[in-house]
Amino acid sequence: MNSFRPVDAESFQNSAPHFGDFVTWNQGRLWQLINSEPVYRQMAAFSLRGLPAVASITHLLAPILAPIDELAETDPEAGKTADRARRAIGSMVRAVLEANGFRKTGTQRAVPPEPRRLFVRAEVYEQAPPAPPEEGESFDWDKYVVQASFANVRSLSPDLGDRPLPSMYSPDRRWFLLSSLDIDVPTASEDQLRVALAAVKSSYQAERSKPTLNYRRLWVHQIDFYELCNLLFGLFNDADEFADPQELLEA
């Protein structure tokens, strides 16, 4: 992931005037939390795995929302504020992610009640692909393929002569092909998934240490590493260990 770019508070207030007052609400705790690098990286990690961004931080939001939620049980006005706070959170999450190269997918998924139900469903985000080059414009192909979708790359290079084959699952999803290492791993074996995870990480870091970077090769390693983390996360539901694949990859 690229370096974190925080959102200017005034810019957010101008772009989301209905929720501008929440920048300073509760002594600014809500805005400062969502507009911070650690929280952004958690949201980005969940987004890269196709999960709702806000699902990565419900445990951090719960203490901030607890007082207004308690009042809402008996006070209708507090109930309105609690509802607005949740919509403000959605706008803040969107502002931070869009400022850092993500976009809405138009898809919403269920948000787990951790530690309690704060949201029923929330938006899923994805990395926005870079704009294709204009005719005659100088163009760094290697950097483009790191972020662009397979369809966008194919439109520019139909033969895909030097692009690695994508990784894939077997039809029964019992095996996953790691194209970065050209090996199959069983999707239900913790031991073998962890061995593969370490091997992909080692290979990725070896590529990173070379004087001349091969962005296509790095991209394939990164995608495989993320998918292995996703398999382990789904298999063992260990949110802490696999919450930020990029941090694991770079550590």
Image: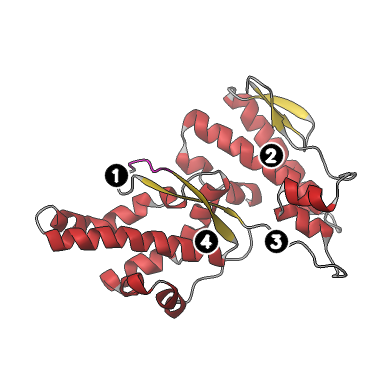
Amino acid type at image mark 4:
Leu
Q: CA distance from mark 3 to mark 4?
A: 15 Å
Check whether the beta carbons of the residues at disc 1 and disc 3 lie within 8 A of each other.
Answer: no
Instruction: Determine which residue is flagged by label 2.
Output: 224
Outermost residue on the bottom side: it is: 10
Whole-number angstrom distance, CA of label 2 to CA of label 3: 21 Å
Q: Is residue 84 visible?
A: yes
Left or right, 62 with reference to 130: left
Q: What's the residue type where badge 1 is placed?
A: Arg
* Residue that numbered label 4 is attached to: 97
Q: Residue at x 53, y 56 (%)?
A: 41
Q: Which mark is residue 117?
A: 1
Question: Quadrant of residue 209 in the image?
Answer: bottom right
Circle 3 residue: 130
**How many C-alpha atoms fall within 10 Å of the one at disc 2: few (<14), some, or many (≥20)?**
many
Taking the spot 34% from the left edge, 60% from the top edge, the residue there is: 87
**Marks 4/1: CA distance?**
23 Å
Residue 118 point in image, percent of width and height: 30, 49
